[in-house]
C-alpha cells in the first residue's frame, strides 16, 4: 500500500525558502515598511529589534540604490541621482524616500552611524543620540 503525502509542491517551496532564509542564505532582504516618525539611531535600532528585525547595512541600501540605476558616493551633492527621474521613481516605488539610518558605523566611532540620503544617494555620519532620521528594517539576519 502506497502512502500518499499531503505536502504539496507550493508547501515544499515555502518550507525551502523559509529554511534558506533562516540559514542566512536569502539573496534579497525582506524590507518592512518604514517607521512613521523620524528617530535617533538608538530608537531606530530598538524599533527594528522590537519587530524581530534590524537596521540594514550600508551595503544593503547601496544594492537597492544601484538596482534603481543610482550611485552611492561620499560626496555631499551627487547631483546625478537627484536629476535621474527613473532612479527617483524606482526608489519611490520600493518605498525609499528621505534619510535613513544604517547599522553601519565608521571605524573607531562610538557616537555616529552612517546614514543615507536616498534622493541624492550620499552617505553621512549622523550623531546616534541626536539626529532624527527614518528607520527601515530588514528581516534578513
Image (tube, grey):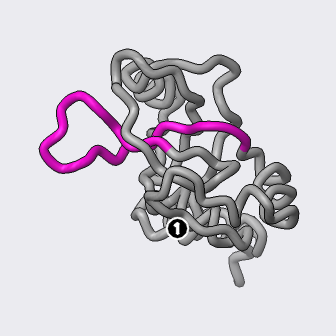
> Looking at the magenta stretch, what is its main secondary structure?
loop
Q: In this view, does 88 lie to the left or right of 124?
A: right
Per the image, is 12 magenta?
no
Eyeballing the image, is 51 above or below 76?
A: above
Asked which secondary structure carries label 1, the reply is: loop
Which residue does the image show at 63% across and 62% down from the upper left? 64
Eyeballing the image, is 15 above or below 99?
A: below
Along the line of sight, the residue nearer the viewer: 100 or 137: 100
Residue at the spot of label 1: 26
Q: Which residue lies furthest to the left in this view?
A: 108
Which residue does the image show at 52% across and 67% down from the upper left? 26
> Magenta span covers which residues?
97-115
Q: Where is residue 126 in the image (x, y as percent from the top left)?
A: 39, 32
Q: Position of residue 25 (x, y in %)?
A: 45, 70
| Crowd rating for badge 1 (residues with CA inside 10 Å; few <14, some 14–19, many 20+) | some
In what quadrant of the picture does the N terminus appear?
A: bottom right
Which quadrant of the structure image shows residue 38?
A: top right
Per the image, is 107 magenta?
yes
The number of discs equals 1
Q: Where is residue 134 in the image (x, y as percent from the top left)?
A: 59, 30
Eyeballing the image, is 42 above or below 139?
A: above
Along the line of sight, the residue nearer the viewer: 56 or 13: 56
Amino acid at each position: 500500500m502506497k502512502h500518499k503525502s499531503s505536502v504539496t509542491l507550493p508547501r515544499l517551496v515555502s518550507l525551502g525558502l523559509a529554511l534558506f532564509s533562516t540559514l542566512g542564505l536569502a539573496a534579497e532582504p525582506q524590507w518592512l515598511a518604514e517607521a512613521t516618525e523620524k528617530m535617533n539611531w538608538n530608537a531606530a535600532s530598538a524599533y527594528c529589534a522590537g519587530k524581530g528585525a534590524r537596521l540594514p547595512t550600508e551595503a544593503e541600501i547601496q544594492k537597492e540604490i544601484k538596482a534603481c540605476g543610482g550611485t552611492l558616493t561620499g560626496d555631499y551633492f551627487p547631483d546625478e541621482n537627484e536629476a535621474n527621474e527613473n532612479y527617483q521613481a524606482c526608489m519611490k516605488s520600493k518605498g525609499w524616500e528621505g534619510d535613513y539610518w544604517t547599522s553601519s558605523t565608521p571605524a573607531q566611532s562610538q557616537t555616529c552611524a552612517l546614514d543615507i540620503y536616498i534622493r541624492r544617494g550620499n552617505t553621512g555620519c549622523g550623531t546616534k543620540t541626536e539626529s532624527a532620521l527614518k528607520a527601515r528594517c530588514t528581516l534578513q539576519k
